[in-house]
Structure formats: C-alpha cells, structure tokens
Image: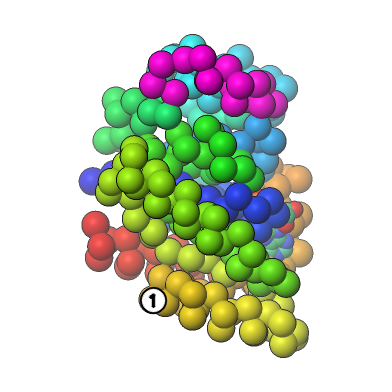
Amino acid sequence: MTKVISVFNQKGGVGKTTTVVNLSAALGKKGKRVLIVDIDPQGNTTSGLGVDKRQLNSSIYDILINELSIADILVETSSTNVFLVPSNVELAGAEVELIGLNNRETRLKNALENIKDKYDYIFVDCPPSLGILSINALTASDSVLIPIQCEYYALEGVSQLMDTIKLVKKSLNKDLEVEGVVLSMFDGRTNLSIQVVDEVKRYFKGKVYGTIIPRNVRLAEAPSHGLSVMDYDPKSKGAEAYEELAEEFLEWSEEEF
Ligand code: ADP
Ligand code: MG
C-alpha cells in the first residue's frame, strides 16, 4: 500500500527539504519506489535532485491550476527509484490563483489518486507557510513528518503547526496522523542541542525518532551538486544518519500502517 507523507513545519530552514531528499534517496536505494512532490515555490528539492528548474515545461503549478496529470509532469532524479513532480517560482502565484477555483484544498489529493499505486512512498515537501499549498499537501496525506531543528526556540510555532494539523483533520482529512518527528542539525558539542532533544521528546512523547540528524557539512554541500548526500559522499556522517533514519522510518511506518 502507498503511504503519502507531508514533510511539514511552517518554519523555514529546519531541514524539511534535506529530509525529503535524503530520506527518499535512502529508501530508493533499499528498493522502495518513491515519488516526491515539491510544493514549495523555492523548488529546492527540485534543484537538489539535479533537475534544472529553468528548463521545466510544466510543474506542480500545472497540476494545481491547470489540472494536468502527474504522469505528464513527473521526471527522473539523480537518485535511484526516486521520481519527482518538480516546482519552480511559477508556483508562487498559485497561492492567490487557487482562491478563485473549485476544490482548491483537494487538488493535489485528486491528482495523486491515479498514480498512487505505482509508489511505496510519496513525500510532499511543503513550503514554510500555513497557506493553501500546505493545506493541499496535508489534505492529500496519510501522515505528517515533522523536522525540528536543534536550536533556540525549537518548539516555537509548534503549537500553531499542531493546530493546523488538527484543523485539517477536522474539516478535510480525518485520518491524518503524525508519522514522526525528526530532530535535525544536532551539534553534540553544545548543551543547547542536548536540551532541545529532551524538550522535543517531552512534547511529542513517543513520536520522536531515535535517529538524530547531526549538523554535517556534506548535507549542506550535496544540493549544489544536484545529488543526495548518499550519492555525493556515502561515507559521510550525514549519509549514515539518513540511512539509519530510513531503517527506523520503515520499521515505524510498516508497523502502523
Ligand atoms: P527547509 O526545507 O526546512 O527550509 P532545508 O532542508 O532547506 O530546510 O535546510 C536549510 C539549510 O540548512 C540548507 O542550506 C541545508 O543545506 C542546511 N542543512 C539542513 N540540514 C542540515 C544538516 N543536518 N547539517 C548541515 N546543514 C544542513
Ligand atoms: Mg525547503
């Protein structure tokens, strides 16, 4: 069965895109078929997987606004078994254009219906906002994966994030669940990182993955080469961490689903 997962946190720079790219790549290497939907106008997942945003004839924008089918738009990526519905800056206008359209919250859900079965996992990389694009992602999803950065104010905005999930659950998607929480950019040398881990674990109880993603320069460099960290530097701490996360992710997700 296919599981659709939104990677969501309305804060920017917390590791959403890095997690989507590298968790997908790690799952792809294990033989899982993965589709990524980039629903962020910044298109960082798109370029991070080696797809040139400027060369796109069509993108997620056409799915949401022109109701094209996903099969017409998806592209291969630099990672084995990982396919992508790309995004570019054109999507920035969709936020406003969607307001006047029918079924504006369910457009992604409807588009995924036909192709869902071809994949084991579909990850939706959300923009850093609580707007209609994120609502489309959450409405189309079985669950939400929440990356949290091990920094000051890590939990700031989390209650708003949980409220958004509750709201979507109530009105658009009653089965939406929290898949898990990924702690990212951990720096073991600082007490702060250690405190944040404790705090997040207290808040989310059993939902936090044991695998913690360290701050690792290879993770920051890989996107400029259009590669996942596994393809860029498979021996790096970043690659090891995302491979471990993929193992744990599979255990949890197959258990619950
Ligand atoms: P988001 O998608 O939530 O905005 P990103 O995944 O794009 O966040 O991460 C923000 C920035 O931090 C990017 O430049 C990314 O390369 C970098 N980054 C993310 N995770 C790590 C990490 N574990 N170690 C080092 N740099 C990271
Ligand atoms: Mg991002």
Colour logic: rainbow
Residue 111: image x %, image y %? Answer: 37, 24
What quarter of the picture does the C terminus occupy?
Answer: bottom left
* Numbered range of the magenta stretch: 88-104
Q: Give the left or right position of residue 251, taking residue 101 as reference.
A: left
Residue 166: image x %, image y %? Answer: 40, 52
The question of residue 91 being in magenta is answered with yes
The residue lying at 69 percent from left, 36 percent from top is 42
| SS at circle 1 | helix
Would the CB of label 1 be found within 8 Å of ligand 1?
no
Residue type at tag 1: Gly
**Residue carrying label 1:** 206
Q: Is residue 55 above or below residue 121?
A: above
Crowd tier of the residue under label 1, counting other residues whose Cα lies within 10 Å: few below 14, some 14–19, many 20 or above: few
Q: Is residue 185 above or below residue 142?
A: below
Residue 189: image x %, image y %? Answer: 75, 86
Q: Quadrant of ligand 1?
A: bottom right
Residue 171: image x %, image y %? Answer: 34, 40
Q: Is residue 115 visible?
A: no
Q: Quadrant of residue 232?
A: bottom right
The residue lying at 70 percent from left, 54 percent from top is 13
